Structures are given as structure tokens and as C-alpha cells.
Image (cartoon, helix red, strand yellow):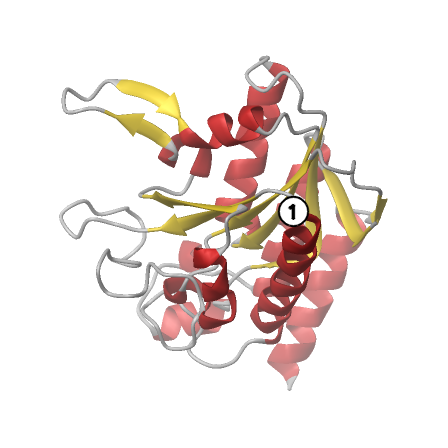
């Protein structure tokens, strides 16, 4: 009980020190795309690997439900959806994380609640082998030369003015994607893109309290309390120019 109170106090301190505010956002009709980051079994399926929740988690459950609801709205309106699927070659580790979402294990597939997207014509699924979706969506040929970027092709091909982002983890893969897309937009790589929106109810991160990290023999730097980490991810994205929303209209 004491540990829970201490964690709640820490979250309130973070919220007070690094304030964020969500607002309603009016999505441009026909010019808005939905990006779903890594809502795969290896990150969101209970017990599906070392980086998945070991037990049902309220924040992750909410994320999946909100993503499903939002994706169905987009499909009904025939607006484009793009989903990243974290998928790794076992021979190519991604330090500091243990092997996860390995190709062929099923852990690199969408959670059951979102599997229906695989057969939707408006949905584009792109496998990635690194944290950053913008980097992972870049095709590399046999010589190691980088070529076209499938994510930018999707944005520019649909002439999107707005991208709404959901997924996991708020402060890792979601944040890396949003910050990189902000820079790409400012650099002129997506000429029609104006708004990069983070839909907070559709985002989640993992929970690894300090005491649990220590009990597992991990260094203190592995600690990752869910509440503060989620909030700090939102703060960093908003401070760089992303729009935080809890009401999409």
C-alpha cells in the first residue's frame, strides 16, 4: 500500500512539474490518416514475451479498445490507416531490450482485437525492425542503400493534412515516431501535412517499478513506472509541437 501511495505521489509531482493539456481536435474530412504503432502481441498481448504485460493492464486494455473504436470510424469513413508491426530477425538484437516480437512467432502480429485490419482495403500494414517507425519504414536494398520510405509514400500518396497517432509505448516507439515525423514535416518531406495529433486514450506504455526491476536483478535505469513514463512521453511530444487530444471530432 505504501509503495502504491509513493508511486501516486510521484505521478502527481511529474504532472505538476511538466503540465500537459489535451483538447478536442476536428479532423479534416478525407485528409486525415490514422497511424497505429506496434499494437502487436509482443507488446500488448498478456504473457506474449518479455516486453508484454504479464497480467491484464488497465492502460493497455483501454488503448486497444480505443484503437479498435477509432479504426472502425476510419474504415466507415474510408479514411486511410497505417499500422506498424514490430518484427525482428533473431540474429539482429535491439539493445538494450531482450529479444522480442520475433518474426514468425506470432508476437509480431496484431493483437486479436485488431486482426480484422489485415483484410481492410484502407489499412496498410508495415513491418519494422527498430524502435523508430520512420526509420523502419525505409526500404534498404541488398547493398545497404536506403531508398523509398513506405510511410512517407502513404502520407504523401493520400495527401494527408493530419495524422492521428495511437499505440505503444507512449514514451518510446510512439514518441520516436511523432518526433521524427515532426522533423520530416518541418523539413518539407510531407508537403501537405500540417497537424500531428496524439490521441492520448489510445496510447499506453509498460510498467516496471523500481522495486520490481531490482528484484529481477536489473539496473535501476531499467525502472519504468507506467504513469510517469506515459505522462513524460506526452509532455515531450507536446513540447515539440504535437497536438494532444482526448476528443476527436
Residue for point 52% across, 54% down: 169
Q: Position of residue 123 (x, y in %)?
A: 51, 48
Residue for point 64% across, 82% down: 2
Foreground of the two, 32 or 131:
32
Residue for point 58% across, 13% down: 187
- Compared across the picture, whether 109 is left or right of 182 comes to left
Residue to which mark 1 is pinned: 78
Residue 49, by quadrant, is bottom left
Q: Where is residue 31 in the image (x, y as percent from the top left)?
A: 71, 33
User: With respect to residue 180, does 66 lie above or below?
Assistant: below
Residue extending farthest bottom: 1
Residue 63, by quadrant, is bottom right
Residue for point 64% across, 60% down: 72
User: With respect to residue 232, does 139 lie above or below?
Assistant: above
Q: Where is residue 79 in the image (x, y as percent from the top left)?
A: 65, 44
Q: Position of residue 60 (x, y in %)?
A: 56, 68
> The N terminus is located in which quarter?
bottom right
Q: How many labels does the image show?
A: 1
Amino acid at each position: 500500500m505504501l509503495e502504491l501511495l509513493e508511486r501516486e505521489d510521484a505521478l502527481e509531482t511529474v504532472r505538476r512539474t511538466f503540465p500537459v493539456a489535451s483538447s478536442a481536435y476536428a479532423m479534416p474530412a478525407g485528409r486525415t490518416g490514422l497511424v497505429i504503432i506496434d499494437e502487436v502481441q509482443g507488446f500488448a498481448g498478456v504473457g506474449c514475451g518479455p516486453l508484454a504485460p504479464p497480467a491484464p493492464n488497465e492502460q493497455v486494455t483501454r488503448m486497444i479498445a480505443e484503437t479498435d473504436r477509432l479504426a472502425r470510424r476510419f474504415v466507415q469513413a474510408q479514411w486511410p490507416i497505417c499500422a506498424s508491426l514490430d518484427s525482428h530477425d533473431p540474429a539482429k538484437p535491439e539493445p538494450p531490450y531482450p529479444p522480442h516480437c520475433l518474426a514468425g512467432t506470432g508476437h509480431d502480429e496484431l493483437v486479436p482485437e485488431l486482426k480484422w485490419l489485415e483484410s481492410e482495403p484502407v489499412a496498410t500494414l508495415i513491418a519494422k525492425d527498430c524502435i523508430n517507425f520512420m526509420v523502419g519504414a525505409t526500404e534498404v536494398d541488398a547493398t545497404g542503400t536506403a531508398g523509398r520510405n513506405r510511410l512517407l509514400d502513404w502520407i504523401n500518396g493520400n495527401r494527408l493534412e493530419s495524422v492521428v497517432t495511437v499505440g505503444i509505448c507512449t514514451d518510446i516507439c510512439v514518441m520516436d515516431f511523432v518526433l521524427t515525423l515532426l522533423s520530416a514535416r518541418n523539413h518539407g518531406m510531407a508537403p501537405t501535412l500540417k497537424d500531428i495529433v496524439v490521441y492520448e486514450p489510445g496510447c499506453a506504455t509498460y510498467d516496471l517499478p523500481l522495486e520490481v526491476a531490482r528484484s529481477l536483478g536489473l539496473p535501476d535505469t531499467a525502472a519504468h513506472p507506467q504513469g510517469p513514463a506515459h505522462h513524460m512521453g506526452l509532455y515531450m511530444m507536446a513540447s515539440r509541437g504535437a497536438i494532444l487530444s482526448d476528443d476527436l471530432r
